Image: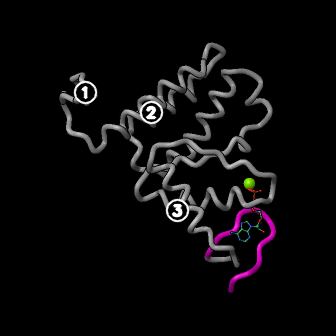
């Protein structure tokens, strides 16, 4: 039986809810267009409920990595290396549930988590993000070099 929920995230199958499907559809348009967005509201406005519904709407078409900085304790913000290690910990937890992330990327995150030391930099993390992006970008593309006309210029796009 459905109940009214006044604490934490609302789950459509369990709770009476305001229908968010139109709102989620609007946000999905931004994602489909490759745009960034932020949801910026005070507490208890329904941010987590909205973002959870969005993740559900995207998950068949996209690899969704859903994580929260609430899971990083104070020590994780003390210096760059600690932050990178904590961020890797959050990513590993998400990666365990996602088969579509290539093993190479999972291994890179594991290695960075395990070997993090005082010389570890944010750049090490960004290098992994670049690998993830190139994986997504190339997923539906033909391999090889293709000419692309941009205005009056002929450019070559390489996909490996
Ligand atoms: N779609 C909705 N329909 C009904 N109540 C909602 C809905 N979204 C949020 N709420 C109410 O708001 C409360 C806070 O939602 P939550 O998503 O945790 O907000 P936030 O992340 O902005 O703090 C929920 O416990 C619920 O009572
Ligand atoms: Mg919240």
| Residue topped by disc 1 | 157
Placement of the N terminus among the 4 image quadrants: bottom right
Count neighbours of disc 2 (C-alpha within 10 A) and say few if under 14, some if 14 to 19, many if 20 or more: few
Q: Secondary structure at mark 1?
A: strand
Image marks 2 and 3: residues in contact by CB distance under 8 Å: no
Please state the horizontal and vertical placement of residue 20, each as a whole percent of the image: 62, 68
Does residue 109 lie above or below 68 as drawn?
above
Residue plotted at (20% across, 39% down): 142
- Residue 5 lies in the magenta stretch: yes
Q: Which callout, 3 or 1, points at the residue further toward the start of the chain?
A: 3
Q: Where does the magenta region start and end?
A: 1-12
Work out how far the residue at label 2 is from the one at label 3, CA to CA, in angstroms: 34 Å
Q: Can the viewer see residue 160 in this picture?
A: no
Residue plotted at (24% across, 22% down): 153
| Residue topped by disc 3 | 25
Please state the horizontal and vertical placement of residue 118, each as a whole percent of the image: 66, 15
Does residue 78 lie above or below 97 as drawn?
above
Please state the horizontal and vertical placement of residue 76, each as a whole percent of the image: 73, 30
Mark linked to residue 107 = 2
Count neighbours of disc 1 (C-alpha within 10 A) and say few if under 14, some if 14 to 19, many if 20 or more: few
Image marks 3 and 1: residues in contact by CB distance under 8 Å: no
Work out how far the residue at label 3 is from the one at label 1, CA to CA, in angstroms: 32 Å
């Amino acid at each position: 039986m459905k109940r009214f929920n006044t604490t934490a995230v609302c789950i459509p199958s369990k709770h009476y809810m305001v229908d968010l499907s139109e709102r989620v559809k609007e946000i999905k348009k931004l994602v489909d267009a490759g745009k960034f967005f932020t949801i910026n509201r005070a507490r208890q406005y329904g941010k987590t409920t909205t973002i959870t519904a969005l993740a559900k709407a995207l998950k068949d078409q996209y690899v969704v990595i859903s994580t929260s900085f609430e899971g990083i304790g104070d020590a994780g913000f003390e210096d760059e290396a600690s932050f990178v290690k904590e961020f890797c910990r959050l990513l590993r937890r998400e990666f365990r549930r996602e088969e579509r992330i290539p093993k190479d990327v999972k291994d890179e995150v594991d290695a960075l988590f395990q070997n993090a030391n005082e010389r570890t930099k944010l750049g090490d993390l960004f290098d992994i993000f670049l690998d993830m992006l190139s994986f997504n970008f190339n997923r539906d593309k033909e391999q090889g070099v293709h000419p692309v006309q941009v205005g009056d210029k002929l450019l070559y796009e390489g996909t490996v």
